[in-house]
Amino acid sequence: MVRTILAVDDSPSDLGRMEKLLAGAGYQVNTANNGQAAVDAAKRFKPDCIVMDVNMPVMDGFAATRALRNDPSTKDIPVVLVTAKDQKADKAWGQMLGTKGYVTKPYADADLLNVVRSL
């Protein structure tokens, strides 16, 4: 069961929206603003789930997901990508990396919550 979530986005407004939505639904939320910060935070906090953007500076969401999967301490944390990248190839790449969900921006609050609740 998901109780703690790491929300990751380089856009302060998008990150704030995710944090408010998830906290309002009863989850404990930590945040990070790029993929490298997400990998570091995941190792530190061990969240039950990571909700992450793809297009970010320093390390994008795809590279961060790959790094998380390659680390024994974070490999089992489910990752949900939340991104404006809506091409079939992007979704397929996310699946190949082992993500557990893919939500396309702009999203309805229920879309993101339903994916998280399904984990």
Image (spheres, rainbow, N blue to C red):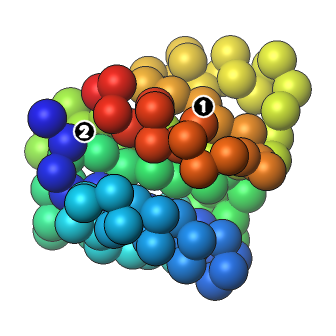
Question: Which mark is in front, 1 or 2?
Answer: 1
Instruction: Name the residue beneath numbered marker 2.
Output: 77
Density class for disc 2 (Cα within 10 Å; few <14, some 14-19, many ≥20) is: some
Q: Is residue 84 visible?
A: yes
- Which one is nearer the viewer's eye here, 56 or 116? 116
Give the image location of residue 53, x and y in percent: 62, 54
Can you tell which mark lies on residue 79?
Answer: none
Query: Is residue 42 left or right of 65 when viewed as pictured?
Result: left
How far separated are the C-alphas under marks 1 and 2? 15 Å
In the image, residue 98 above or below residue 27: above
Dot 1: what SS?
A: strand
Query: Is residue 13 left or right of 47 when viewed as pictured?
Result: right
Amino acid under disc 2: Ile
Instruction: Determine which quarter of the picture holds residue 15.
Output: bottom right
Give the image location of residue 33, x and y in percent: 53, 76
Name, please, the residue furthest toward the right. 87
Instruction: Name the residue beneath numbered marker 1.
Output: 102
Identify the image quadrant of the C terminus: top left
Instruction: Determine which quarter of the picture holds residue 86.
Output: top right
Q: Residue at x 45, y 71 (%)?
A: 19
Amino acid under disc 1: Tyr
Q: Residue at x 20, y 31 (%)?
A: 76
